[in-house]
Image (tube, rainbow, N blue to C red):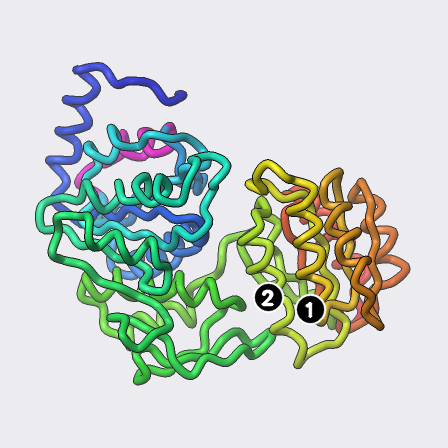
Amino acid sequence: MKKRKLSIEENKKYINLRRNFPKPVIGVTGNLGKTSTLEMIRTLLASRGKVLKNPRGYGSWKNNINTLERLNPEYNYALFEFDYQRGNHFTEILRLIKPSIGIVTNIGDAHLNYLGSMMKVALERSGVVKYLARGGTAILNKDDELCSSLADSISTENIVKFGLSESADYFAADIQQLGPKGISLKINGQYPAVLPFYSIQDIYNFLAAVACARILDFSFEEIIEITQNQFQLPAGHGRLLQIGSRYFLDESYIATPRSLSKAARALIGFQSYSKNIVFIVGDMTGAGVNVEEQHLNMGYFLSALPISQIITVGEYAKYIAKGASLIKASGKTIHSVNTTDEVIKILKDHLPARAVLGIKGVGSVAAHRIYRFLEDSKLV
């Protein structure tokens, strides 16, 4: 089902489905972190009841309509994701869904080549909080200037903000990256937790989930206990796997400039575990008009990080390798290839024990092949 105008009969059906569901309906949008935030919220809510969520994890117009079709009283909660990279103009469906809690993870430099300007992005993103149900709550990223400013242009008085600043309603303090053990922090400077994720972005995602759960009467202790013991990042979105003496950080989902930077920063959090850090990078999407230049710039950025080996895969990713090569750094090896077979050959020849390998933007099939190779050749 592609995006199309709903008929009068369809509108009536969906309005009735939503009207007959008085329980919490949560909508999430943003440039980065939507899927992980939703999975954190789903894990928390599943401890109390049945959660409706699109199993495929994509926030397209079609998938939201399909999820809305399944809305019925047997569920205790309903979760929706709105992904503007996969289709514009969600106004019609937002008016039908009317989230009781709307979350914007961030806006930043989101998809400028799709929507034309940052202000237009902000207006598009505001839909998820503009069309809240009566008495609904907006949850916004205080550290993202455009996201935070949405508070000035929406009608609800129920606004909660999260971030790393103590002026946010929910913030993280005393943050420490612990390599394979995750990240330790204190929620609002009071509630200590060691959590199973590896990037600063996932701290933001977690704080958004905390804000949502607190609105739904979860205690801080309950949130921490469930997240520590039951949550796992989605495949391709930062999940960590141990294979013998090696670690595999799976960020294989599509690479944008912002998400690739996030994956690289997460990877260098493993320096305390290993000096052998390997990063496999595919082509970026959402890189704007000057695609080659954006890939070159990413190469410059990666060259400054303590990554011992960079392997790029793809037509445009070779410019990442070129950019990284232009800035000489001792102890850094750079390869540029076109196929997964070539990646595996390099790993076979150059991957030591206790290596930490990160992968970004190469897709789930390539990630699975590389993981299987590591499993077959693991060193204890």
In the rendered structure, which amino acid carries the disc numbered 1?
Leu
Q: Residue at x 32, y 52 (%)?
A: 104
In the rendered structure, which amino acid carries the disc numbered 2?
Arg
Q: Does the magenta stretch include residue 69?
A: yes
Q: Which of disc 1 and disc 2 is earlier in sequence?
A: 2
**Image spot of residue 215 (x, y percent):** 19, 62
**Image spot of residue 303 (x, y percent):** 73, 63
Residue 105 in the image: above or below residue 122:
below
Q: Residue at x 39, y 51 (%)?
A: 107
- As measured in the structure, the alpha-carbon distance from the residue carrying label 2 to the one carrying label 1 is 8 Å
Left or right: where does residue 355 sit relative to residue 235?
A: right
Q: Residue at x 45, y 73 (%)?
A: 195
The numbered dot on residue 296 is: none
Of helix, strand and loop, which one carries label 1? loop
Q: Can residue 209 be seen in this view?
A: no
Q: Residue at x 37, y 42 (%)?
A: 121
First to last magenta residue range: 62-74
Q: Can residue 345 be seen in this view?
A: yes
Residue contact between numbered discs 2 and 1, judged by CB atoms under 8 Å: yes
Q: Name the residue under label 1.
A: 305
**Image spot of residue 249 (x, y percent):** 63, 61
Left or right: where does residue 186 sit relative to residue 334?
A: left
Left or right: where does residue 291 sit relative to residue 101?
A: right
Quadrant of residue 261 within the rendered picture: bottom right
Q: Which of the two residues, 303 or 341, is positioned nearer the viewer here?
A: 303
Q: Name the residue under label 2.
A: 265
Quadrant of residue 41 within the rendered picture: bottom left
Residue 24 in the image: above or below residue 6:
below
Q: Nearer the viewer, mark 2 or mark 1?
A: 1
Quadrant of residue 244 within the rendered picture: bottom right
